[in-house]
Each structure stands twice: as structure tokens, then as C-alpha cells.
Image (cartoon, rainbow, N blue to C red):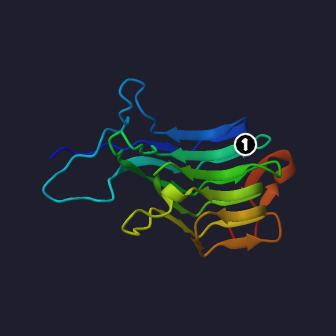
């Protein structure tokens, strides 16, 4: 049995991100339209969810530009005449994403399966956006789980999915948000 590898994006400070702070995209091959992660393989034990190890994004601070997206996590859309793609199972944990009053903190699309936990969102139009292909599969298995995140000055905290234990903050959780100091204040609910 071969061990699976893991790709981790951690401990970065990304400022003034234009379109995306971090963008993870499985994509398809331009020749034959095969999925980059490979088509799923039929084995003795059938895994209908088609999950494979995905990228872990943790402990990053991302400051987006106008209408930007902090983290974009994409799988691959299956077409009628193409092999079913595997679903990357990603974990997005302990990130701080700050916008300019618009844009999206985390965007999950195209058959991605993710767990989001302990993220802080501030000054955004939407905190988390999940498309229909990434909410649940044909057997109603949940593909995207959103748990225990904090939101400060966010228009729509979560769009397209449900969250558990979300915290809406009424005061800035940061030392000096205007000057880019995103260290937590004391006391605050995000520590």
C-alpha cells in the first residue's frame, strides 16, 4: 500500500492580494479533458464519495484587495463525456482573512470537499461561499463542513451551506485593523 502525500500552505502573510490570496485548483488536462488529480479507480471497496487527500491551508493571514477572494478552493466539474474526477478533501484551518468591505473570504466550488474551522473573517461582502456541487453528493453525504469561525463586519457570513458555532463579533478583534495589525486584541473572543 502506497502512502499518500500532503501539501500544506501554512504561516504566510499575504497583503494586497488582487484576485486571490491563495488559489487551489484541480483543473483538467487540455488534451483529452482528463482530471489532473486523475479519474477515480474502481477497487474492491467502492468509495462513492471519490475523496482524495487535498491541500491543507492553515495559520495564514490574508488581506485581499477590491472584490478579491482570500482563499479559493476548487475541485473539478464533471462533464457528460468526461471521466468523473476525484474530489479533493481539503482542510482550511486557523486563517485570518480581511477585506476592504467587499469580496469573499473563502470560496469553495466544483466538487471540492472541505472542512473549515477556526477562521476569522473581517470587512468582507461574504465570509464563506459554497457552490451546489460542493455542499453534498448524490448520497447526501456532506462535502463541506463549516465550524466555529468568527465574523466581523461581514455582509453574508456563509452563502450556499450551513455553519455550526459561528461567532458574530460586534467589536474589532484586532489591535489596529486600519494599519494592518491583525494581532488579536485582549480580551477578544478569537483567542
- Residue under the image location 62 percent in, 60 percent down: 119
Count the marks.
1
Residue 59 image offset from top left, x and y in percent: 57, 51
Residue furthest toward the front? Answer: 80
Residue 22 image offset from top left, x and y in percent: 59, 40
Quadrant of the image occupied by residue 8: top left
- Quarter the C terminus occupies: bottom right
Residue 182 image offset from top left, x and y in percent: 74, 52
- Residue under the image location 36 percent in, 68 percent down: 139
Residue furthest toward the top? Answer: 31
Q: Name the residue under label 1.
A: 68
In the image shown, does 172 or 124 lie closer to the viewer? Answer: 124
- Residue under the image location 68 percent in, 66 percent down: 150
Vertical comparison of 188 with 55: above or below = below
Looking at the image, residue 15 sits to the left or right of residue 177; the answer is: left
Quadrant of the image occupied by residue 166: bottom right
- Residue under the image location 46 percent in, 52 percent down: 112
Amino acid at each position: 500500500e502506497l502512502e499518500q502525500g500532503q501539501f500544506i500552505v501554512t504561516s504566510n502573510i499575504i497583503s494586497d492580494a488582487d484576485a486571490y490570496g491563495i488559489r487551489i485548483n484541480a483543473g483538467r488536462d487540455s488534451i483529452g479533458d482528463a482530471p489532473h488529480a486523475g479519474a477515480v479507480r474502481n477497487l474492491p471497496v467502492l468509495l462513492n464519495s471519490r475523496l482524495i487527500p487535498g491541500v491543507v491551508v492553515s495559520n495564514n493571514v490574508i488581506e485581499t484587495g477590491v472584490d478579491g477572494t482570500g482563499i479559493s478552493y476548487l475541485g473539478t466539474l464533471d462533464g457528460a463525456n468526461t471521466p468523473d474526477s476525484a474530489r479533493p478533501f481539503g482542510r482550511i484551518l486557523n486563517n485570518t482573512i480581511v477585506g476592504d468591505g467587499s469580496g469573499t473570504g473563502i470560496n469553495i466550488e466544483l466538487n471540492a470537499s472541505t472542512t473549515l474551522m477556526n477562521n476569522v473573517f473581517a470587512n468582507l461582502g461574504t465570509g464563506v461561499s459554497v457552490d451546489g456541487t460542493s455542499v453534498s453528493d448524490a448520497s447526501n453525504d456532506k462535502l463541506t463542513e463549516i465550524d466555529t469561525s468568527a465574523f466581523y463586519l461581514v455582509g453574508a457570513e456563509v452563502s450556499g451551506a450551513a455553519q455550526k458555532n459561528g461567532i458574530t463579533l460586534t467589536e474589532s478583534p484586532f489591535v489596529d485593523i486600519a494599519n494592518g495589525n491583525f494581532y488579536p486584541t485582549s480580551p477578544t473572543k478569537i483567542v
